[in-house]
Image (tube, grey):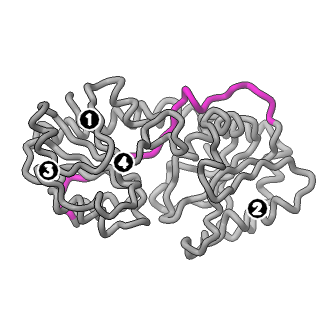
Amino acid sequence: MNILYVDCGNRLGDNYTYRYYGDFYRELVANENVDVYQGIPANMNPLLAAKKYDCIIFGLGYFAERNVNAYKEIPGLRNCDVPVVCMLHKQQIMLKEKLYFCKINDIDLLVNAHITYKEFGELLGTAATRFWFSATPEIFYDREIEKIYDVGFCGASHGDGKIKGPTENLRDRVYDILKERSDLNLYWNRHTRPEHRIKSIEEYAATMNKSRIWIATTGPILDVSPRYFEVILSKTLLFCNEMPFEYEGMFVDGVNCVTYKNDLSDFEEKLNFYLTNPKEAAIIIENAYNHAISNLTSKHMCNNLLQEIKKISKEV
């Protein structure tokens, strides 16, 4: 397929802080003929006149853009005879504008990592599919190095009041418990700027692999981020808060992760158990890894989405 991939903010580089923005793009490049357009297109007509494309994809990085001008009608897009795919992302920010963009430009396929993909597809009157986040095993893998940290975490604290409900201030509440534990060797990086949290992807992945347990929590819309899969592929024990209903069966306590209650009433008990019972932790780690490496890598996710794109390419 000849694909035009539209991105904003140069978010496709190997060393970009949120590397997963470019994982799908890199898999596409390995398998298809891909041209990339960086920025907000002023008019699609010149691009489509210069080359015949089988598909246009507005990627994750495009929908991470906070410039309102990115979410307006693009001349030449609405009535083009090329299937248009939008990978809706960061829907807790400027959702109204992003959905307007999809509607006014009459897209053909909405892709979303959250359960709301169905609701949004119905709202827009377009095909919709779920795109699970994933991780790349060439970056996140077991380096067979010493586990020098008992517990690790890297991410925004989300302690700014933007998350309400049972997970409000969850990461800060976890840290408040751990910082009192002088018996633990703790890695905890919650710098407000992502480029200071992750100075290099290699360093970040190695630190994760050096940890016996890695803390993960659901995001602002109770979503599961790529971090869950990064931990699993690194053969580190995934320690995460209880799963929203839409993830039931995907992350199972005691099978491929360890879950703790949002009120943290069982957090220390479970933490102590798995730190003092490494054989039990190893069983969960191996279960999680075997499933993920066979089903949930970036390559798997790319292939699944390509099948959906090829379906609409035949229909348009």
Q: Amino acid at mark 4?
A: Cys
- Under tag 1, what secondary structure? helix
- Under tag 4, what secondary structure? loop
| Residue 47 x/y as whole percent | 16, 39
Quadrant of the rendering where the N terminus is positioned:
top left
> Which of label 3 and label 2 is nearer to you?
3
> Which of label 4 and label 3 is nearer to you?
4
Query: Which residue has dot 1 on it?
Result: 307
Does the image show residue 133? yes
Q: Do residues under tags 4 and 3 come within 8 Å of each other at their CB atoms?
A: no
Instruction: Look at the image and give the residue range highlighted in magenta.
Output: 124-147
| Residue 122 x/y as whole percent | 22, 63
Task: Please name the residue shown 67% across and 40% down the image.
Answer: 284
Among the 4 quarters of the image, the one containing residue 11: top left
Query: Which residue has dot 4 on it?
Result: 8
Residue that protrudes farthest toward the right in the picture = 182
Q: Camera-side residue: 48 or 277? A: 48
- Near mark 2 (Cα within 10 A), the count class, few <14, some 14-19 or many ≥20, is some
Quadrant of the rendering where the C terminus is positioned:
top left
Q: How many marks?
A: 4
Does the image show residue 283? no
Task: Left or right? Give the position of 108 relative to 253.
Answer: left
Query: Which residue has dot 3 on it?
Result: 77
